[in-house]
DNA sequence: CCCACTTAAAGTCACGTCAACCCTAAGTAA
DNA sequence: TTACTTAGGGTTGACGTGACTTTAAGTGGG
């Protein structure tokens, strides 16, 4: 027989989200992965940075809860949202017992512009984060590896982009996420081989030199979340 | 502002597990994927089959909770355990609100023998399940796709096998899980290419014909769960 | 108007992987 | 010894991919 804590010690359920977006790096000027964090306004970890999240309401699905807290705390509407993992170790919060169901999200650049950015919400370069509250540093780490793995075998990069884009844009997303440089010719071949790209005419005069072709992502059947499979 | 249910309507947290094991199919005689289900002894869905699970105790980590309920309800000790997904749609339980954090597990054949198999616990062929309680049918579906995907790119098949086995055994596991036949020669090549197999002498007289070599899985560093990454 | 420059986009080649298959080795049962 | 069965190694061709080259299509400067 295992020992159990007293009955009135409750487990509370929170939903948090790791949000990724692309922005220019202030020093290098390159497109880089950023993510918004919120400052904690109460103990524990008061004043420290943490993932946006909140308690699960009784009338909300999990993904809906993630969207709502996202909107409430950061003003962002994600273009892609997927469950990451449920973190529930006993010691992950110093006082009470909290199980966090964590999502990860991708937002488009124009969303970043209109996002909240104030004293209690701030954007950070994904690889240069301050120390975070709770186990949130490990969570971000895991979300990063998931994003980097998934972008190599599914076309989620489009979630960072406007509906119409060039192959150079698409490649820039991959390069920013994976922190590498990719051969333009080979990247083109692989991208076109997926059959998810539809050409939509050529770019009418860019800044200089040969204008690139524009593409759109074909609206393939998205991969359903486990809840909504048939 | 969104409407919320009254404060005293609580969300309860359960941990359930999809357990896979290999057994002989009664008709074909082939190794097949089976899973144990437990009969519900109270409403809702009283009398129907469901995944083994139970409420999360305040002093248990999530994986530990999965192990405990597994042991308590089916007597099984899994050889492999991984988090699958957190299911929490509002309508997944008719009365109360339940969020289930679901794990999936693999058990060895000798465990199956000593497992409970009575009126309230029964084994079923994974592809021929009765209607299950709640959304458990969809959950099993998802667990199956995860298992089938993961066995192709990680050496989890060993979790079904005793410490020492032949390449034919290993191939039989893959064939049972994927429901295909695999070319023995090509399978051998791929299996040995992973470098995770260590030869441990030859089989001393099997039933007939040429005796196969025996192998053991090398104790590589296992992939850490997201909670315990460094 | 020609030319230097830049990026887009297509093509070439070497190499590694893998499925299909063929063949030999090593044992058992008659 | 022979027939039979499974273990296990080898060969071939299709395919994907990284490194690299070449051509196309624009710009701006003299």
Image (spheres, coloured by chain):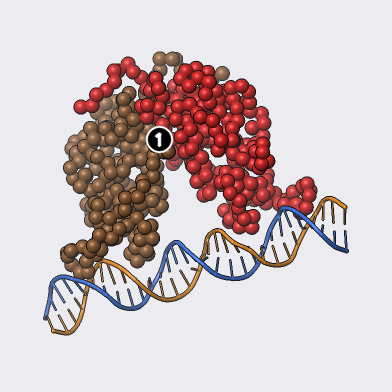
Chain colours: A brown, B red, C orange, D blue
Q: Residue at x 29, y 20 (%)?
A: B5
x and y, in percent, of residue A92 in the image: 40, 30
Where C22 falls versus B131 (above or below)?
below
Res. B136 visible in picture: yes
In which quadrant will I find the C terminus of chain A? top left
Where A80 falls versus A57 (above or below)?
below
What residue did someone put label 1 on?
A227
Where B209 falls versus D17 (above or below)?
above
x and y, in percent, of residue A164 in the image: 24, 55
**How many residues crowd mark 1 within 10 Å: few (<14), some (14–19), many (20+)?**
some
Left or right of D21, for residue C1? left
Name the foreground residue: A162 vs B42. B42
Tell me which chain the residue with mark 1 is part of: A
Q: Residue at x 52, y 42 (%)?
A: B147
Among the 4 quarters of the image, the one containing residue A95: top left
x and y, in percent, of residue B48 in the image: 52, 23
Q: Secondary structure at mark 1?
A: helix
Res. A132 visible in picture: no
Q: Residue at x 39, y 37 (%)?
A: A228
x and y, in percent, of residue A183 in the image: 35, 64
In which quadrant will I find the N terminus of chain A? top right
Among the 4 quarters of the image, the one containing residue B71: top right
Q: Residue at x 61, y 51 (%)?
A: B181
Name the foreground residue: A151 vs B145. B145
């Amino acid at each position: 027989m295992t020992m159990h804590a007293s009955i009135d010690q409750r487990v509370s359920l929170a939903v948090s989200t790791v949000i990724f977006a692309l922005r220019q790096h202030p020093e290098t000027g390159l497109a880089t992965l950023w993510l918004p964090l919120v400052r904690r306004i109460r103990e524990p970890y008061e004043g420290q940075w943490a993932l946006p999240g909140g308690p699960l309401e009784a009338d909300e699905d999990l993904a809906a809860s993630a969207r709502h807290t996202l909107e409430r705390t950061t003003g962002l509407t994600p273009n892609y949202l997927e469950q990451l993992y449920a973190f529930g170790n006993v010691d992950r919060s110093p006082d009470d017992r909290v199980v966090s169901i964590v999502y990860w999200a991708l937002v488009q650049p124009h969303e970043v512009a209109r996002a909240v950015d104030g004293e209690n919400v701030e954007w950070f370069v994904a690889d240069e984060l301050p120390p975070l509250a709770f186990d949130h540093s490990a969570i971000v780490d895991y979300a990063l590896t998931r994003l980097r793995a998934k972008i190599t075998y599914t076309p989620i990069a489009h979630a960072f982009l406007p509906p119409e884009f060039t192959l150079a844009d698409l490649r820039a997303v991959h390069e920013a996420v994976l922190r590498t440089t990719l051969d333009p010719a080979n990247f083109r071949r692989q991208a076109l081989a997926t059959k998810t790209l539809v050409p939509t005419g050529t770019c009418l005069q860019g800044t200089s030199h040969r204008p690139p072709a524009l593409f759109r992502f074909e609206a393939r059947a998205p991969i359903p979340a486990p809840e909504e499979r048939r």
